[in-house]
Amino acid sequence: MSARIGVVTFPGTLDDQDAARAVRLAGAEPVALWHGDHDLQSVDAVILPGGFSYGDYLRCGAISARSPIMTEVITAAGHGVPVLGICNGFQILCEAHLLPGALTRNESLHFVCRDQTLRIENNRTAWTNAFESDQLITVPLKNGEGNYVADEATLDQLEDEGRVVFRYVDVNPNGSRRDIAGICNASGNVVGLMPHPEHAVEELTGPSTDGLTLIASAIAALAGGGVLA
Amino acid sequence: MDTVEQALGTPDQPQPYAELGLKDDEYQEIRRILDRRPTSAELAMYSVMWSEHCSYKSSKVHLRQFGEKTPETDAMLVGIGENAGVVDIGDGWAVTFKVESHNHPSYVEPYQGAATGVGGIVRDIISMGARPLAVMDPLRFGPADAPDTKRVLPGVVAGIGGYGNCLGLPNIGGEIVFDETYIGNPLVNALCVGAMKHEDVHLASAKGVGNQIILYGARTGGDGIGGVSVLASETFDEGGPTKRPSVQVGDPFMEKLLIECTLEVLGAGLVEGIQDLGGAGISCATSELASNGEGGMHVVLDRVLLRDSSLTPEEILMSESQERMCAVVVPDNVDAFMAICRKWDVEAVVIGEVTATGRLTVDWHGEQIVDVPPRSVAHDGPVYERPYARPAGQDALQADGPGNLARPADGAELRDTLLRLLASPNLADKSFVTDQYDRYVQGNTVLAQPEDAGIVRVDEVTGRGVAISTDCNGRFAQLDPYRGAQLALAESYRNISATGAIPLAVTDCLNFGSPEDPAVMWQFERAVTGLADACLQLGVPVTGGNVSFYNQTGETAILPTPVIGVLGVLDDVDRRTPMSWGPDGELIYLLGTTRDEFAGSEWAHVVHGHLGGIPPQLDLEVERQLSQILVAGSRDGMLTAAHDISEGGLAITLAEMAMRADVGARLWVPDGIDPFVFLFSESASRAVVVVPRSEELRFTEMCGARNFPATRIGVVDSELGPDAGEAAGTQVLQVGDSFTVTLDDLRAAHQGTFPALFA
Amino acid sequence: MARVVVDVMLKPEILDPQGRAVQGALGRIGLTGVVDVRQGKQFVIDIDGEVDDDVLAQLHEIAANLLCNPVIENYEMSVDVTGGPAPVGEHQGTFVGASSDAVAHANEGQQ
């Protein structure tokens, strides 16, 4: 029985099909979840994909964070279900207070699409356990509002607790504080990152296949029966 | 309120047809068609639908050639006349593609003009029943350092990115060209390509008496009232921008919902006919649907959902509010259709039905305000035979060749010329712009800028995919519009072939000055004829396109700019040929014949500010041979890389390949050719390919069998730099004994220009 | 009929690149002496009926948690019960409260 990983579609979500492809290529079964339902369909893990849900109106992810499906996602996250937020998904996780901080406008004020090098600084989360510690990966990044901010106390706490999962290397494309590209919650089951691992799954269409390892990590975490903090 | 009954009763009432852009004879023709004076609503409809932008009245007589000279091909499923051409690419897949202009609105409001241009072309594609796959944008601006370019370019780029990225469509290519003639008239052409299975092709026709007409999407407001007829059919005055009519404002989120909703209703088989609302809004959609179908439609205009309740019926008919579509649905399917719209939070309302009357009738507040034969509005608009004449100055222009321009005298000057050209705005690296576009969404992008063509995979199982390129050299077209249009087609056709795709079909966006100027009309007639002749000879039909006239400020028209888009197919995108060379020792071959041809070249323009002479000669049979070699070479695994030669010549092609690979090469100038000509001439029908040694014999024999010139001009070599042999060597291009240049120096020149100008 | 106006601004310690871009533009068009520019949002909400204490509390909750992101933004709210549409940008309302550190910290506790 392969792991069943839910991929949520909000109005305006763009990368749901790509996230589903990543799940499929990694050997798990993608399950389409609808924003308006109160039903996670018993999936083993959830991905909140990238895009411009609700056109980024009000604030990126603000309206999505209050969708019916998110009540279920928040509950499931509290029970240790692995949840991955990619780009707009990361914004939604912050708006839903499953992760601290916020994503704001890129410092350059321009949307930027580039192949980004990241360092894996926490390989004990549900989504990174199949990486080596300090491994460098290359994953596409594409956003206009990817500038991660939080107050100094929160940033210090994230660093002290090893909850910075991905860090920008060589180039900080959006001005994120402390070069933070992605973080996790205290339990390590909820991870959010701005870059797009679902676009690094085939040599034909991406800069690497490093993205598959995030899904492989979740599959391994689920097979192991629990999450490592 | 002006009703049909009122019009019958007041035949001599003066009407403001001139203010709406209609000429005296056009107004009289409307009276003749209706056998009475038109109501004000009918007048509004005719005025927008008979505008140049909608009716093609100045271009129809010439565009006929595309139909008359259509080459024999099995690939066409739907030809000219529909929203976009549809091409069979094999395995039951069909692809639709089209390029359109949104030039004047982009001068007035760059962000929204460009954004709504993208929105409009995407809706054209989904109204054929296709899922949009990718977009591309051929753009042209005034001089790069002009203050107004700094106003327009960033806005246009932000608009394209802001709208396209939000729709989830990868931007896979395009062009950015600067010339002083575009300063008051930037060109923003937008292309979209989509795919569907053969059986899913939908046409814009209203058939089946009693079928319901449903308007869905955004509410109707005062956007762009009369924008089409006012903006695109008149030139700007000097000292503008004084004309600021209301511009359309786009909402990409609504368009994204519209795409998903439309694909779902199409997939559920709920739609008999479908049309998007673009220029001329409801007037256009209803008259086109009606005239393509049974010929009769009745509309109750009160049912249209409004953003602004103060709109008059004339304004509602003329409104160009974005993100609206019109579907024809059998009564039994209406509930299911509405349910899908509700799911996507898209508003929808039945505004009318198909009738057997052969007339398009519109009621407002219970009274009839429109009763017209739909064909007269949508298809049988005025046709002009505008006078055209070769301009008096053309002979002198062609006689003023670049032969006397001072040429680089030695290797150092050749090196400087290369760096200077690479840094010039037309040739400089465009990443500053293209990095603002998402190229990854949908996960099917195989090649994107700066490669020769954009390639997207259509079928994940078989690997079947399509390649698209858009090209035009306006300076060549100015020197000789007939040959210039052919050279544009040849370049795009060559770019497709360089990636290994087989060219199949053509779309065009013909951007010209005022059709009231016989010299411009001559350019147009020559370009269309040249294009039609070339398409026939190369066997690639024009499937559709767009004409944009009145790109003119005062007396100065833009360079004639016939942008040509070619679509090609790959059985398996995995076999595509990129531009970046690879391992050391692979052989660099120049395909084709290089002549001393610098008229209209980048060198003449950048170094001497010169435009004159006759553009490079073109033998379409040679171009076809080159295409076959590139495609066969790709398919049979003989080539590591390929890149076409165009603006700037061979030196630019080689520099681009080296920078892309971050690997240098040892090159030499063949015997018997002058180094300057070798490096910078812009002769047509040439490409550079990189061949592994193991494939060299097979490849050269293939060229020999076709008598096609293939000259070995270099070897990929990463160890030429000052620290050759050590790990940290600087990559260089070494050109015989003439000069050596490091890739760092090439990059500094190439990549510095755009950030310095626009960041 | 009451008009509620909520002004949302980034917290002073948050980088505001849009405000900075506007500041640059002001300088380029000749306005000297501009020390700082911050860019924010204004929500104008027209409500039928009376804005009593319950409604006011609801509005504060909405302003604090939906209209503004308490991690990075503060809000100020005014209510105008005199009726009739006020010109955009001007509100004659009564100031009724703003986000405070207490509110911000309360939200952080939810993580």
Image: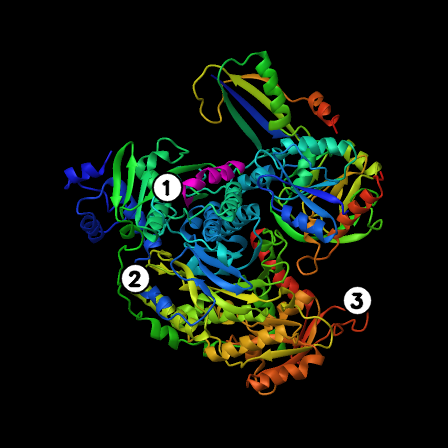
Viewer-nearest residue: A197 or B635: B635
Q: Is residue A206 left or right of residue C77?
A: right
| Amino acid residing under circle 3 | Ala
Residue range highlighted in magenta: B326-343
Which type of secondary structure does the marked residue at label 1 adopt? loop
Does the magenta run of residues contain B79? no
Q: Amino acid at mark 2?
A: Asp
Q: Residue at x 73, y 44 (%)?
A: A4
Q: Which residue is mark 2?
A: B517
Q: In the image, what residue type sits under mark 1? A: Ser
- Which of the 4 quarters of the picture holds residue A59? top right
Residue B233 seen from this side: no
Query: At 74% across and 42% down in the image, what residue appears?
Result: A182
Q: In which image quadrant can residue B512 be found?
A: bottom left
Closer to the chain start, of discs 3 and 2, is 2
For label 3, the SS is loop
Label 1 chain ID: B
Q: Which mark is residue B728?
A: 3
Q: Looking at the figure, which quarter contains the N terminus of chain B?
A: top left
**Residue hosting label 1:** B319
Q: Where A39 falls versus B596 (above or below)?
A: above
Residue A199 in the image: x percent, y percent? 68, 52
**Residue B51 percent coordinates (x, y):** 31, 51
Give the CA distance from mark 3 to mark 2: 61 Å
Could you tell me which residue is drawn at 18 percent across and 41 percent down? B14
